[in-house]
Image (cartoon, rainbow, N blue to C red):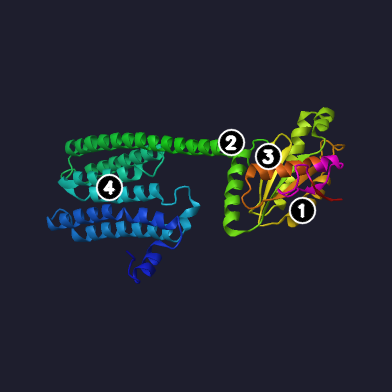
Amino acid sequence: MKSPSWQTPFLDWALGQKQPTRRYVLLVLATLQLYAVTIGILLHSVHLGLLNRPMANWLILGGATTFLTVFALVRSGWSLRLKDPIMAFPHALASNFICVLAFMQLGDHRSNVLIIISQTIVAAMFRLKPARVLLLGALTVGMLAVATITLTLYDPLRYPVTKSWAILAVGGSALLMLSLVGKWISDIGVKLGRQTRELGEAVRTVEQMATTDMLTGLLNRRVLTDLAEAELKLMERTGAPMCVALIDLDHFKDINDRFGHHAGDTALKGFAQSITPQLRQVDKLSRWGGEEFLLMLPQLNEHEALTALERLRQTVEALVFKDHALMQLTFSVGIAQAQPGESLEHLVDRADRAVYEAKRQGRNRCVLASSPSASAEPMAETLT
């Protein structure tokens, strides 16, 4: 159900138009219920004659100022520069300070304020780190202790030592225990968050291992097989051309024998890194096996693919390897354009025959595969 047209501009004005600002503003607005309860207690205390009206007004003004200041800093986006964008710790500490001021004014009913303070600590524990939760509780109890000492020194008749310190002992211990529980809950939240991130990283690693070749970072054979088969089905429906190019690095065994297997790995990675930036987004390159690579070229006919592969061949031929200055890398490639009803296996087999023809003709060249209707002997058109 769509919101009325007037609501969208209002919500954009109140919450902001961008995430995560909107989410942070909503979290700040959630604290309004604590302010509402506190104001209700203050007004009820005025009604019962426990608190004079001017003092209640000052306390309400202090609470409103605190909330509006935090709201403005979060809504403006200024708080995004902080580690805690909703300013949970200073907000909770300022709120508890106002509650302590109310605690000092309510006489025999001051213990009711401890409930509001407890709610503030409970609300903050879900946003603060464990040490901050404990610090909030300790600072709050410290403010209550200062308030109790002040009251017993300057108004001993209304706030006798025995009763005041009993309230502080019970209330302070309860708040400290609540802070410890909050720290424990926050610890669990931190651990769960860390485990969630580690699990996400593990899942991404497994996905990467399942879909990519770990040496070159290219797609692996299984993934490209699935993509190519899907592309063949799309070609059947749309009639758009599609080619595959089977690339085989020339004299790769000689590179390993002469320069070592580390140089062979360097050659494979250098090939992948030089080719990838020149491909279109729809092109897909995979390590097909050993020193063989399969390149899928959707929406290109064989002559367009031939032009593209010739450009890539020249790029690889010009590669210079810093640690192996004498090593030269070239490749031979067979290009096959898919025909209606042709399977991927047969398409790759035609490209493979063209690779052998390229090798036979002297390597470092691009060859077009023969059509499926040709004889079993591979026929090829050569670009020299």
Vertical position of residue 305 compared to residue 222: above or below: below
Which is nearer the N-term, disc 3 or disc 1?
A: 3
Real-space Cα separation, disc 2 to disc 4, in angstroms: 58 Å
Amino acid under disc 2: Met
Give coordinates of residue 12: x percent, y percent: 40, 65
Q: What mark, if any, has residue 287 been given in the picture?
A: 3
Q: Secondary structure at mark 2?
A: helix
Vertical position of residue 3 compared to residue 23: above or below: below
Q: Secondary structure at mark 1?
A: helix
Amino acid under disc 1: Leu
Magenta includes 376?
Answer: yes
In the rendered picture of this protein, how many numbered marks are placed on residues? Answer: 4
Which is nearer the N-term, disc 4 or disc 1?
A: 4
Q: What mark, if any, has residue 194 been given in the picture?
A: none
Amino acid under disc 4: Val
At 76% across and 40% down in the image, what residue appears?
248
Vertical position of residue 21 compared to residue 164: above or below: below
Q: What mark, if any, has residue 306 been given in the picture?
A: 1
Q: Which residues are magenta?
A: 357-378
User: Residue 329, can we see it?
Assistant: no
Q: Nearer the viewer, mark 1 or mark 2?
A: 1
Judge by depth and name the residue closer to the eye, 236 or 103. Answer: 236
At 49% across and 36% down in the image, what residue appears?
198
The quadrant in which residue 67 appears is bottom left
Q: Which residue is mark 2?
A: 209
Q: Which residue is mark 4?
A: 100
Give coordinates of residue 193: x percent, y percent: 43, 39
Real-space Cα separation, disc 4 to disc 1, in angstroms: 80 Å
**Magenta highlight: main SS:** loop
Q: Nearer the viewer, mark 2 or mark 3?
A: 3
